[in-house]
Amino acid sequence: MNTSFKAALFDLDGVVFDTEPQYTVFWGGVCRKYHPEQPGLEQQIKGQTLTQIFQGHFAGMEAEQADIVESLNAFEAQMHFDYVEGFLPFIADLRAHGVKTAVVTSSNQPKMKSVYRSRPEFKSLFDAILTSEDFERSKPDPDCYLKAAQRFGLQSDECVVFEDSFNGLKSGRAAGMAVVGLSTTNAAELIVPLSDLVIAHYNDVDNEKISRLLGFSH
């Protein structure tokens, strides 16, 4: 592993913002409406992009897809974007140590406009923000994280990925990067096999501790 940790690449929902409980409520309603024969489907689709959800469970249902998109846009426009515990001090510490920071999310620009409206300071926290429009292939493909590394002119072993979903964790792994899993969406024991380190929040970590636990040296 490289001796320097130069970039932190963050997924958005469940990693920067504690939004997953809200999405579970939204998708729970959608799944009960359209797929009552599959109880708990909202848990299975966590971490999937809208395209993946539609392809897997709403194929050929164009009218229903349109209704879901309309409902989702309205829902996201009024969501609460609360930071995961300890995130703001953590990212401030990273930046103070010269670590580049990026959001790498499957969210689209309309969703991000809601974020910027709710959190005017958001853009100032990151050196780059990559959204679904920036990628050819969705997580678990490594495309998004490799593009983020390229944006900074860095190698994979100089980057650390912060993820909560199975697809996201697999994407970071496939990119050849160190992966920190957040147990905000899935139970810690379930994401351990896909993570180099698992944390519940950012309260007890800083740049030095993450570097040490992941085997980077200063």
Image: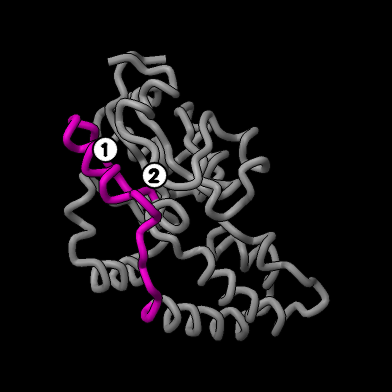
The Cα–Cα distance between marks 1 and 2, rounded to whole angstroms, is 25 Å
Please give the label number shown on residue 202: 2
> Quadrant of the image for the N terminus?
top left
Q: Position of residue 208 (x, y in %)?
A: 31, 26
Q: Is residue 155 above or below residue 44?
A: above
Identify which residue, 113 or 21, lies in the foreground. Answer: 21
Q: Amino acid at mark 2?
A: Tyr
Q: Is residue 98 above or below residue 44?
A: above
Query: Between tags 1 and 2, which lies in front?
Result: 2
Q: Quadrant of residue 12?
A: bottom left
Q: Position of residue 203 (x, y in %)?
A: 38, 44
Q: Residues within 10 Å of mark 1 (few under 14, many from 20)?
A: few
Q: Is residue 149 above or below residue 43?
A: above
> Residue visible at 30% across and 31% down?
207
Q: Residues within 10 Å of mark 2 (few under 14, many from 20)?
A: some
> Residue visible at 38% across and 81% down?
78
Q: Write the start and end of the magenta stretch as one range.
A: 77-104
Q: Amino acid at mark 1?
A: Arg
Q: Is residue 81 above or below residue 175?
A: below
Identify which residue, 95 or 58, lies in the foreground. Answer: 95
Q: Position of residue 197 (x, y in %)?
A: 51, 32
Please give the label number shown on residue 151: 1
Please give the label number shown on residue 73: none
Identify which residue, 60 or 24, lies in the foreground. Answer: 24
Residue 83 is one of the magenta-drawn residues: yes
